[in-house]
Amino acid sequence: QVQLVESGGGLVQAGGSLRLSCATSGRAFSSYAMGWFRRAPDKEREFVAAISRNGYLTRYADSVKGRFTISKDNAKNTVYLQMNGLKPEDTAVYYCAAGSSTNGPFDSWGQGTQVTVSS
């Protein structure tokens, strides 16, 4: 249906910033709501942020609200996650996903990109 490739992960210091990118192909980018999820070593996968097909609606997990911003560039078929004020607890593998709405279901997933935040 759609292929997703994440990039932009890496090692950053606490309080720093990082921007993740998710490039898509296979279907019209505007046909999908997009989301970001993450999985920390000792936790289950959790929701981070999502954006609607038209880009007008966004939602965030309480843990990242005010620090992270999701956006999309239809011309580049790419969704972004701008992460500011990073904390060590943000350390996780971050996954991009495509779905029907900001509330899901999300049925296409990328391979993930590692984000590590040092103290």
Image: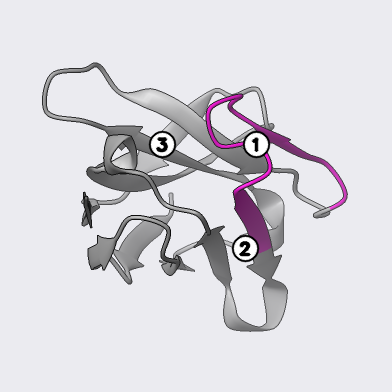
Query: Image quarter for residue 82?
Result: bottom right
Q: What whole-number distance in Å separates the C-alpha atoms at marks 1 and 3?
A: 14 Å
Q: Amino acid at mark 3?
A: Phe
Q: Which residue lies at the image location 68% right of the left edge and 83% below the top edge?
A: 75
- Which residue does the numbered mark 2 point to in the structure image? 29
Name the residue nearer the viewer: 40 or 3.
Answer: 40
Q: Amino acid at mark 2?
A: Phe
- Residue 71, by quadrant, is bottom right
Q: Residues within 10 Å of mark 3 (few under 14, many from 20)?
A: some
Q: Residue furthest front?
A: 119
Does label 1 or label 2 sit earlier along the sequence?
A: 2
Foreground mark, 1 or 2, reads 1
Q: Secondary structure at mark 3?
A: strand
Please give left or right for residue 10 compared with residue 26 in the image.
Answer: left
Q: Which mark is residue 65?
A: 1
Residue 56 position within the rendered picture, expressed as x and y whole percent measured from the top left: 88, 50
Between the C-alphas of marks 1 and 2, the distance is: 25 Å
Look at 37% across and 44% down and name the residue there: 87
For the residue labelled by badge 1, is the local secondary structure a helix, a strand or a loop? Answer: loop
Q: Is mark 1 in CB contact (under 8 Å) with mark 2?
A: no
**Labels 1 and 3: the sequence-earlier one:** 3
Sequence-wise, which precedes: disc 3 or disc 2? Answer: 2
Q: How many marks?
A: 3
- Disc 3 target residue: 37
Residue 32 x/y as whole percent: 64, 48
Marker disc for residue 35:
none
The secondary element bearing badge 2 is classed as helix
Judged left or right of residue 56, residue 95 is left
Separation of residues labelled 3 and 2 (CA atoms): 18 Å
Residue 39 place in picture, x, y as percent: 25, 31
User: Which span is picked out in magenta?
Assistant: 56-71
- Closest to the observer, 96 or 68: 68
